[in-house]
Image (tube, rainbow, N blue to C red):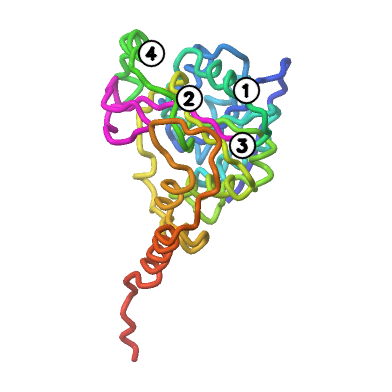
Amino acid sequence: MDFTYKKVPLAYSPVFSILIPSWNNLDYLKCAVNSIRKNSRYKHQIIVHVNEGKDGSEDWVLAQGDIGYTKSSQNAGVCYGFNAASHLAVADYLVFIDDDMYLCPDWDFFLLEEVKKQKDDKWCISGTMIEGFDKGNACVIGDKNYGTHPSEFDEAKFLSEYASYPKEDWNGSQWYPMVLPTFVYRAVGGLSVEFFPGMYSDPDFMIKLWHYGVRFYKGIGKSRVYHFASRSTGRVKRNDGRTEFILKWGLSSNTFFKNYLKIGPKFLGTLPEPEETFTLKFKKQIDRWKVKFKARPIDISR
């Protein structure tokens, strides 16, 4: 697999360096980039990682003139994609988004206002997704369908309604758009490429941040994006990220989210170290047992 890159000099100091991996998703990528240009209050650096680019994505990015990019000759997945793009970042803060997102007006203002409040130098902050299908996720404004493809996106109706949906700040930031200090991302080594093409790389990244000392994980209710959920992952062979996560960390992502990040609708502030109760220890043991006794192919050679 070959990697190439193109730097774009900037005549300004960007507030955020925005990283966008994209795998032959040109229509969505155009929509995402155009929403950044249209709806951002501040000037940012946009960096796209082009996976393959068989749909003209590379040509389109080159034609823009203001977008830096990295490219892999094959689909490198989101881990390599974000990591490669991050090397071109010049801002103090990185923002991670998917290419199938439309960023709402002042999405960046509300994130930056929260960033300015931080007294510690290690934190993780997310915006809030609006989706047409998700009804059970406490961190998402769900069941709000404005289209599943940019060609059918009812932008005018969405812009007239998106801010009216009530949503308080929530706990356990781990969804995109996500912002964190650039040095923190580099200090933990970015996303772990052993999770290629990407399933469970986000929970793995969150627990890496935890071990690095991050205890502030906050979702901002007013910073919003529309998520088309094009589901690029349906085109790839999925890695067994759940098993790999347990083998690596000794607990499941669900146990980590529930007992450490405490993901939920109410923001709890800086998180404490969880008490290692008998219940938590037993839950971790159950997680490990599930992997240990996972069904294996029968050896018929004996």
Q: Return the disc, 3 or 1, that comes first in the chain's sequence.
A: 3
Q: Are marks 2 and 3 in contact (CB under 8 Å)?
A: no
Q: Main secondary structure of the magenta part?
A: loop
User: Which residue does the numbered mark 3 point to in the structure image?
Assistant: 85
Give the CA distance from mark 4 to mark 2: 13 Å
Which region is colored magenta?
123-148
Query: Along the line of sight, which residue is nearer the eye, 104 or 63?
Result: 104
Residue type at mark 3: give it: Ala
Give the CA distance from mark 1 to mark 4: 23 Å
Give the CA distance from mark 3 to mark 1: 27 Å
Give the CA distance from mark 1 to mark 2: 13 Å
Residue type at mark 4: give it: Ala
Mark 2 surroundings: few (<14), some (14-19) or many (≥20) residues within 10 A: many
Residue 115, relative to residue 260: is it above or below? above
Identify the element where label 1 is drawn: loop
* In this rendering, the label closer to the viewer, 4 or 2: 2
Determine which quarter of the picture holds residue 100: top left
* In this rendering, the label closer to the viewer, 3 or 4: 4
* In this rendering, the label closer to the viewer, 1 or 2: 1
* In this rendering, the label closer to the viewer, 3 or 1: 1
Identify the element where label 4 is drawn: helix
Mark 1 surroundings: few (<14), some (14-19) or many (≥20) residues within 10 A: few
Q: Which mark is residue 163?
A: 4
User: Which residue does the numbered mark 2 point to in the structure image?
Assistant: 220
Q: Is residue 265 left or right of residue 79?
A: left
Residue type at mark 2: give it: Ile
User: Which residue does the numbered mark 1 point to in the structure image?
Assistant: 117
Q: Return the disc, 1 or 4, that comes first in the chain's sequence.
A: 1
Q: Are marks 3 and 4 in contact (CB under 8 Å)?
A: no
Image point 48% across, 43% down: which residue? 261
